[in-house]
Image (cartoon, helix red, strand yellow):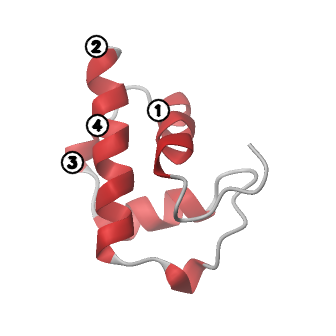
Amino acid sequence: MPGMDWNNAEDIALELLERHPDTDPLTVRFTDLRQWVVELPGFTGDPAASNEGKLEAIQMAWLEEWRDNQ
């Protein structure tokens, strides 16, 4: 998905679910989550622009998608 940045929590969540389908998002440390997001194809956000609020929004969106697929 081209052009994703830290504000695209739902899009990022779908990409993370696709790449880590068996991972409970609540078990992922924010440092790892940040790295996984930065490594996504099409992620164009500034790695330094992440913060706890943005990572939490991504984690919660991912958790919702993950639970829907269990």
Dot 1 or dot 4, earlier in sequence = 1
Disc 3 versus disc 4: nearer the observer: 4
| Amino acid at pointer 2 | Gln
Report the residue marked by disc 1. Answer: 17
- From the viewer's perspective, tell me whether residue 41 is left or right of residue 31: right
Q: Cα distance, mark 1 to mark 3?
A: 14 Å
Report the residue marked by disc 3. Answer: 27
Dot 2 or dot 4, earlier in sequence = 4
How busy is the neighbourhood of tag 4: few (under 14 within 10 Å), some, or many (20 plus)? some
Q: Which of the 4 image quarters holds residue 70?
A: top left
Q: Position of residue 42 (x, y in %)?
A: 76, 53
| Amino acid at pointer 1 | Leu
Report the residue marked by disc 4. Answer: 63
Q: Are marks 2 and 1 in contact (CB under 8 Å)?
A: no
- Helix, strand or loop under label 1: helix
Instruction: Kindly give the residue lying farthest to the bottom in the view shown.
Output: 48
Q: Cα distance, mark 3 to mark 4?
A: 10 Å
Report the residue marked by disc 2. Answer: 70
Q: Residue at left 37%, top 39%?
A: 62
